[in-house]
Image (cartoon, coloured by chain):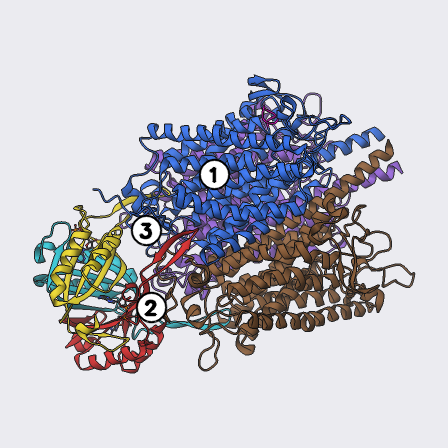
Chain colours: A yellow, B cyan, C red, D purple, E brown, F blue
Amino acid sequence: MVQLVTAVIKPHKVEEVKDAVKAMGVQGMTVDEVKGFGRQGGHAETYRGAEYTIDFIPKVRISVLCDDSDVDAVVDAIVSAARTDKIGDGKVWVTPVSRLVRIRTGERDGEAL
Amino acid sequence: MVQLVTAVIKPHKVEEVKDAVKAMGVQGMTVDEVKGFGRQGGHAETYRGAEYTIDFIPKVRISVLCDDSDVDAVVDAIVSAARTDKIGDGKVWVTPVSRLVRIRTGERDGEAL
Amino acid sequence: MVQLVTAVIKPHKVEEVKDAVKAMGVQGMTVDEVKGFGRQGGHAETYRGAEYTIDFIPKVRISVLCDDSDVDAVVDAIVSAARTDKIGDGKVWVTPVSRLVRIRTGERDGEAL
Amino acid sequence: MNTTATSAFDLFSQNTNLLWIIVGASLVMFMQAGFAMLETGFVRAKNAAHTMAMNIAVFGTGATAFFLVGYALMFGGYSAKIPGFDWGYDHALGSALVGSGHWVFLWKGGFALTGGKFAASGAVAGYFLYMLAFMDTAATIPTGSMAERWKFKSFVLWGFFCGAIYYPLFGAWTWGGGWLSQLGNSVKLGNGYVDFAGSGVVHAVGGVAALTGAAVIGPRIGKYGKNGKARGIPGHSIAMAGAGTLILFFGWFGFNAASTLQIADGQFALVAANTAIAAALGCVAAMFWVWKRTGKPDPAMIMNGLLAGLVAITASCAFVDPWAAGVIGLIAGIIVVEVVFFVDQKVKIDDPVGAIGVHFANGLWGVLALGIFASGKYGVDALGAGIGWNGTTTHLDSAGSATGVTGVLYGSAGWGQLAAQAIGCLVIIVVMGAISWGFFKLSKVIFKGIRVDSEVEVAGLDVPEMGVLAYPDFAGTHEGLVDESV
Amino acid sequence: MNTTATSAFDLFSQNTNLLWIIVGASLVMFMQAGFAMLETGFVRAKNAAHTMAMNIAVFGTGATAFFLVGYALMFGGYSAKIPGFDWGYDHALGSALVGSGHWVFLWKGGFALTGGKFAASGAVAGYFLYMLAFMDTAATIPTGSMAERWKFKSFVLWGFFCGAIYYPLFGAWTWGGGWLSQLGNSVKLGNGYVDFAGSGVVHAVGGVAALTGAAVIGPRIGKYGKNGKARGIPGHSIAMAGAGTLILFFGWFGFNAASTLQIADGQFALVAANTAIAAALGCVAAMFWVWKRTGKPDPAMIMNGLLAGLVAITASCAFVDPWAAGVIGLIAGIIVVEVVFFVDQKVKIDDPVGAIGVHFANGLWGVLALGIFASGKYGVDALGAGIGWNGTTTHLDSAGSATGVTGVLYGSAGWGQLAAQAIGCLVIIVVMGAISWGFFKLSKVIFKGIRVDSEVEVAGLDVPEMGVLAYPDFAGTHEGLVDESV
Amino acid sequence: MNTTATSAFDLFSQNTNLLWIIVGASLVMFMQAGFAMLETGFVRAKNAAHTMAMNIAVFGTGATAFFLVGYALMFGGYSAKIPGFDWGYDHALGSALVGSGHWVFLWKGGFALTGGKFAASGAVAGYFLYMLAFMDTAATIPTGSMAERWKFKSFVLWGFFCGAIYYPLFGAWTWGGGWLSQLGNSVKLGNGYVDFAGSGVVHAVGGVAALTGAAVIGPRIGKYGKNGKARGIPGHSIAMAGAGTLILFFGWFGFNAASTLQIADGQFALVAANTAIAAALGCVAAMFWVWKRTGKPDPAMIMNGLLAGLVAITASCAFVDPWAAGVIGLIAGIIVVEVVFFVDQKVKIDDPVGAIGVHFANGLWGVLALGIFASGKYGVDALGAGIGWNGTTTHLDSAGSATGVTGVLYGSAGWGQLAAQAIGCLVIIVVMGAISWGFFKLSKVIFKGIRVDSEVEVAGLDVPEMGVLAYPDFAGTHEGLVDESV
Ligand SMILES: Nc1ncnc2c1ncn2[C@@H]1O[C@H](COP(=O)(O)OP(=O)(O)O)[C@@H](O)[C@H]1O
Ligand SMILES: Nc1ncnc2c1ncn2[C@@H]1O[C@H](COP(=O)(O)OP(=O)(O)O)[C@@H](O)[C@H]1O
Ligand SMILES: Nc1ncnc2c1ncn2[C@@H]1O[C@H](COP(=O)(O)OP(=O)(O)O)[C@@H](O)[C@H]1O
């Protein structure tokens, strides 16, 4: 079976995480830009004298589909590559996938990875 | 265990939903900009005389990881904060999460929230 | 019960996929822009003589909530509409949804679609 | 034959003067591009097409009205008083519509540039164009302060109103030779109200409409929190705003230096240098001041500071020494920061681009500064024998000859000049303020509100009002495109 | 000594005339920035780098060709006919290449600005520069109508072709003193084909190439739905397009007013005022017209309307009264809306920026409008004793003296003028249309198609053709970066 | 009466000359908008507000310093040597501060434009303004090469330093009549160092600071991979950069053509034409060269090529024939590609905008090219009887009369000129290089580093340094807004 590993990380860590995941033998991933809100908090700036807060902080979300058997390793790889030990490093989580298809070939599940 | 609550809402409701979720004691959330297509439908405009349709309507997607025990409350909070009673208010749904890690500390599952 | 069908496809296929899904009777969908990394690989360009690689390729992600009973048909519809038979066509996967609410009305699960 | 040579020279030199006016007019017209980029950069992306469209249409509407009506009301009886021009000069085309003698309030004659002399005379056409460009500048100022919420329909009426009546009114009183310009003759106050290139006539008059308009229309949704605290709503493109600022700076050389209307003395060069010096000091002063006040050198304020220096020097640029231009600019840079903060946070009038601080406050400061720093060296006889600047002959010295425009730093005679300037400021605030306030109030009735619905405002004005997205290819620029009240 | 004084004055006044030409040339050259921003704003983000690069490279390629070859073909035998210039004026540098007498079709002489007089003479250099800038304007028009699908290679050839041959051809026939300009002498039609600053020579000639080019290259993928219905494909930055529009407006003062080529009479000022008036009315007319037609005041049409007014007044700006300039602009504003709609929806030629409506249709309207509204006051003797505008002496009145350029509203003599104008229009449509059509057809053979592959077109031309993204930091600007047919 | 007529003409012609200077100064000042858009377009979105703010503040700081101090050091003893100006010309206002005779190194006099003549004289004010605009150009060059990492505080000091000392120093040695300009008199090298509009004085001097600054500050994080290989870091808006390029092109007509400082001969027109020709060839050459080198016609290089042609022709534009202008531009287009590649990939100095290739390398090429291509036709007596260009009388021919500026292609006498040019280049590289390097090294001590923290650099400088986002409404423009080291 296949599972979906999702991570929200700091943007400047994308390259490193990508390399780490690739090194695991995972063949692909999908990323998008998100804004995060958490312990890290935002900060206030002034624009022409009036304050405004930037409270959503830019993050990158990474989605990796992988085999059951690889999930642990992928999660660990992401965690160690994305870690800066500073607040705001983000989260990784795993959700079950009941079916997967590769559009080009119609291959399914593990085959489709 | 942890679950993932996802909501697609109207953009101008983000602040209110954020406040409502925060008020529930949830410590973080991740948002991104999406385009929605649904009952609300799009609308046609003209550009130099030729019509074009804007049929995907901007929405904001909110992802909140929370404890099993908080899921109901979080869903309700989002629903009531995001509601305008007009078509296009959006949806909230819940998916299971089999594992969660906080990157900074390596804490897991409920601890990682 | 309800499930979530997610697809990562080539951007110029969005209209066709939308039409195919709509033709299935599905009432709505949510799309966002993502960047993909996979077999398709990236490519190198030069900017003022120095190389740089565009290794994340723009894709569109489509999320469709639908009834258990429709999942197969929706997946197939997406696959056939998005297919170009060329590398990089993308993936479709299905994840379970434990609960769904329509914000406007509070309707739940199948009702909320 | 010698005579012929001389008169060929006279004609040619007059036409060279006219050339300078046309080059200057083109530069001032180009300022519309600067305003367009500055204002559009300072609004949110969801209102960018609306703001840009206003900045183009304001020329169209304002110019049409000024062409048909405004120019005739402003200069009808005075014509193009371009020095050394035989045609046009002192040949009244029309006559007073309201008032007479030193107390003329409006003129008439030459509507749609028709009438004997108009069609034939390059001089009148050139003067018209230069004045048109100034009108355009005044007209576009409120599009900034009222941006992100103004109904396009209502804005269109403003363009016609400003070009036909609003701007020509104060214009007739000052540059048109009307009552304010004659305060020197009528009540012996210096050379009368003196405003070389329009700190008052253009900037403060446009600025007071920006103020009353913003007050009448109310603040943008979300500008003031529940506690009433002002929130910053950053503009969507600092880069665009910066480019606009530098275009305005360029255009200002036409605005100020070509206001000599002739090149026979080298004064236009001093004017240009003073303009640059005041801009530099305004920029630097605002940068350091805002840095001290908020901890960071806010780019929007660096831009506003440069423009503040330009607005402030505009009235006096031909009458002051370079060091004084520096001082005027420096003070302008501080004023703009303080006024923007004050209006935003204390008065709670919401002005997305800082138009009130830049044009209104520094327009007034510029008018007054002339009464302080004018050195008396210039403006004695700018238009020919016995005529002081602005067509006055007053302020004769003990020997009975006309004196240059003199501020209080250059002799006690300057107090009269300062008084004339203060009267001008008062008239702008009270009379032009009331007229523009009345116009916006009346517009409210005509258009059932001059402000878009709150749903439209939240969604962004571009689609509901203009039918286009400013940036359809960029993610996240429009939060909610449609009127969601279906 | 008196003689010396006189001749010093003569020399100085000639050089002042030349100065105006150089200032004007700079302004016209700056219009390239306006075109670049307008066109780039009106295309999708995924083609923005390609469109911008064309707008810069078209100057490079076109100017190189015009310098080496084009100027010689256009003016070789005529030289710089700048009024009052002793050097250059009436001193033929080369001779006719094709034709003779009133029927010259091409000149030769002064290739690469070499040859006796060229290197020494500021007058020739200045005239060359001004003409270069006009050529550049014509050359850049098709980059708009063919945007978002034109192979860069094929575009490069167009630049050289336009600068070397295409533009100089019609140029030689008109401003170069060739057969069209001599229709007054040869077949007694008014003053011959008269086109003051190039509604026809520049705009319609560039515009017809925009038309044939867009026809040959075909519509963008997705422009016409399965049912054949035109779909709007909004440009990626209304703000950028608006700024470009206002830059063009600014540059137009150089385009039109400096086309007097001298300042000895004040005519340049009337020209400038007429230019602004037509722009204003064009803007307002298009705004209201499109508002009525579609329900919203489309910003793209407000911009196109202002430009339409400018294009239309260009031919006649020196010959008409201000009221007529207003009427010409007003009609232009309506024409542009209708033609853009018609071409887009009925003719189904896809023109992303509206170049056909603005430059082609209103270029022709401008040429004809001169035959209607020219007042007869100007153009009698613009170049010296006995020479009418365009180097003709024709249309002598009953007393045997040359008359000014006169349209049908000012006497039945105007019908000859209108006929000459109509012949000019016909030549543009038929001859220049055929040449440009042939060029694009031939290019298709040379480059195996002048259009990029459909995969590239869908992906956006920026990466495949130019190797860069226009906006790499912004999400969503490029749908599919790569040729996915691997 | 005849005398009066004559002197009225003299006065008027002098003021017309002055007008050209003011128009030119405005154009050069507008180049700041071009630099601002070019540089901002070439950086990443996360640093756009910082880059734009530098481009505005550099005028403010530099101009303030030049007004207070720099102009006095550069011209104190020389005043405004504007041809035909009785006031100002040859009337020393101050005196040498360092050096004497042919070997003056700095002047003094006229600080803050005070002192007898300054306040009164339009001529001095106009000359000051023109020189101010050139200084501004030099000052803004390093803001490009050091962009995306320069502490704003440290940048502010650069502005003051450049305006007060750095630029005036080399300026005094050349245009100020100092030792380099006198090499013809002192050591008989041609007409001394000749640099018509500043390929060296402005571009190479600014460019060498861009080089030393970029070297001292180091490359941007990520510019060089682990293997040391250069990585392209594409700018965030090719469209903005392109618009900036075309603004610079426009401004360059003021830069070069108004450097004649008078219009009495038609030379300014030749200068303008040469400027356009070199730009065209530079653009085309760079396009084809980069196309061949990398497989695609990189738009950034098309832009840099056009600018390279402009920089290279700047020194010699008044002294060469059009064909030579073409050759100089063509070579410049190749140089810029090669130097940008070389600096980036071999020398490994990181210059985000290509300033070193454009301004430094082509500035030097321009200075040398004069020594090769100058035709000897101009510069004999540009400033009055017996004075060669740059105030020299040297290089008398066998008949004992002064010769024009002559390069090696026009006679062996040219070798002296080429030597003078080479000395100028050497002084720029060695002396100005050392001074600017020392300044940046010293700044490092003063500000505890002139570079922002790496966290700030990765996050983007806009919020940490300036307190704003350049594009708050667009997704993905700022990677990590905050200093995450909490
Ligand atoms: N409960 C949550 N649900 C969804 N996303 C979360 C949640 N908590 C945190 N995040 C995401 O993780 C990012 C980092 O979280 P934060 O609390 O700031 O630091 P840390 O990960 O070090 O605990 C946030 O910016 C947000 O995007
Ligand atoms: N089946 C679906 N799958 C995924 N997203 C959906 C689905 N239906 C609706 N949505 C999302 O919810 C948004 C609102 O839905 P819509 O049908 O317009 O109104 P309502 O939520 O009031 O029923 C849509 O714009 C879309 O983003
Ligand atoms: N393991 C994966 N996890 C998440 N997304 C993936 C994965 N593999 C591929 N993708 C997504 O699918 C897209 C297409 O994949 P690719 O391997 O290039 O071609 P194909 O789908 O034809 O196998 C990628 O660009 C990426 O967005």
Same chain? Circles 2 and 1:
no
Quadrant of the image occupied by residue E403: bottom right
The image's mark for residue D473 is: none
Magenta-highlighted residues: F176-181
Q: From where the camera sits, is residue E469 visible?
A: yes
Per the model, the C-alpha gap separating discs 2 and 1 is: 44 Å
Same chain? Circles 1 and 3:
yes
Please tell me whether residue B21 is drawn above or below residue F314 in the rendered image. Answer: below
Q: Whole-percent x and y of residue E305?
A: 57, 63
Give yes or no for residue F177 being in the magenta stretch.
yes
Per the model, the C-alpha gap separating discs 3 and 2 is: 24 Å
Q: From where the camera sits, is residue D279 visible?
A: no
Q: Residues within 10 Å of mark 1 (few under 14, many from 20)?
A: many
Q: Using residue D42 as the reference point, say whether residue D418 is left or right of it.
A: right
Q: Secondary structure at mark 1?
A: helix
Q: Using residue A2 as the reference point, say whether residue D274 is left or right of it.
A: right
Q: Secondary structure at mark 2?
A: strand
Give yes or no for residue A20 being in the magenta stretch.
no
Quadrant of the image occupied by residue E75: bottom right
Chain letter of the residue carrying label 1: F
Q: Residue at x 60, y 31 (%)?
A: F419
What residue is disc 1 on? F140
Q: Residues within 10 Å of mark 3 (few under 14, many from 20)?
A: many
Q: Residue at x 49, y 41 (%)?
A: D307
Q: Whole-percent x and y of residue A77?
A: 16, 56
Q: Amino acid at mark 3?
A: His
